[in-house]
Image (spheres, rainbow, N blue to C red):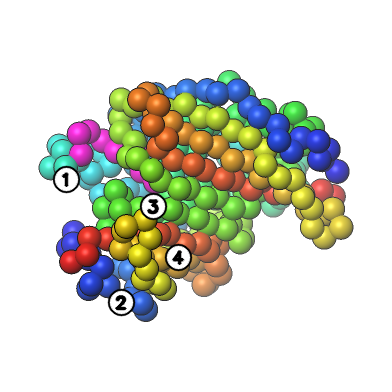
Amino acid sequence: MAEVNFVSVNVGDQIPALVKPEITRTTLGLFAGASGDHNPIHIDIDFAKAAGMDDVFAHGMLSMAYLAQALTNWVPQSTLRSYNVRFSAITHLRDRIACDGEVIEKFEENGESRIRVKLQAVNQDGDVKLAGDAVIALPKQ
Amino acid sequence: MIDRSHIGREFGVHTADIEKGRLRFFAKATGETNPVYFDEEAAKDAGHPTLPAPPTFLFSMDMEVPDPFEILKVMDIDLGKILHGTQEFMYHKPVYAGDTISFKSEVTDIFDKKGGALEFIVKKTSATNQKNELVAEMSRTIVVRNG
């Protein structure tokens, strides 16, 4: 990855977008196992229906992991100081999640040159599923 | 309504081992393409001692307890009625395969919106490694759909 530094980054810059494949039942089964979140609402349609949902739906943490990949494809993880999201809508089966981010602030904090990146994950219809931000400490130049 | 006396409730410390196989499984399940997260040689080439835990992985390790939904049982909440509202991570130190992480959690707030139709539980967790270094802090909001 090309090294990103504080001097070369400007407010308004977009981070490289990341588009993930369609979410399937297999995706959710694998993520339930790998993530340790075995809540049946994500993998058992009978349970989901009994809970008043039309079908199983994706773990919020799956999309949060996707959005993190957009960050770590752009800068090394060691630069990440905080990462926060709000799960604004349920991600459904067959959604394709696209992750993007924009630099919204450059500042000095704790002796480091830091940036704040506004993040969002949207589906193929542009519906926002996750909105959040990350603080990243960059080398000066 | 959830009994507000649960605010301040602490949960017992539990520990989880960060394992290479589980990290590779997590990479596969999330369609990770950056080899740093599944190929140990690539990780070493990038300056890591071994495979690193990706940014959200500690949330998963915090669920490595006999009953990850204990908080719901304690508060008499139906598992089918919860949603994940918000999730925050603050990072202090990297976490690698081979680390043993201890988790300590506390309920810091419970509130409601829409006349109680939605209730919110805030749980804060600190994660420390085998050297007793604070590696990360997490905060999660659980949304409960009443009615």
Res B76 visible? yes
Toward the viewer: A58 or A128? Answer: A128
Query: Which residue occupies 47% across, 34% down?
Result: B127
Q: Which residues are magenta?
A: B48-55
x and y percentages locating residue B11 in the rendered image:
63, 27
Query: In the picture shown, does residue B97 fall above or below B140?
Result: above
Kind of residue indicated by mark 3: Arg
Q: Which mark is residue B55?
A: none
Q: Which residue is mark 2?
A: A10
Q: Which residue is mark 4?
A: A119
- SS under mark 3: strand
Q: Which chain is indicated by disc 1?
A: B
x and y percentages locating residue B77 in the rendered image:
77, 36
Q: Earlier in the sequence, mark 3 or mark 2?
A: 2
Q: Please tell me if label 4 and label 1 are on a single chain.
A: no
Q: Which residue is mark 3?
A: A81
Q: Which chain is indicated by disc 4?
A: A
Q: Please tell me if label 2 and label 4 are on a single chain.
A: yes
What whole-number distance in Å separates the C-alpha atoms at marks 3 and 4?
Answer: 15 Å
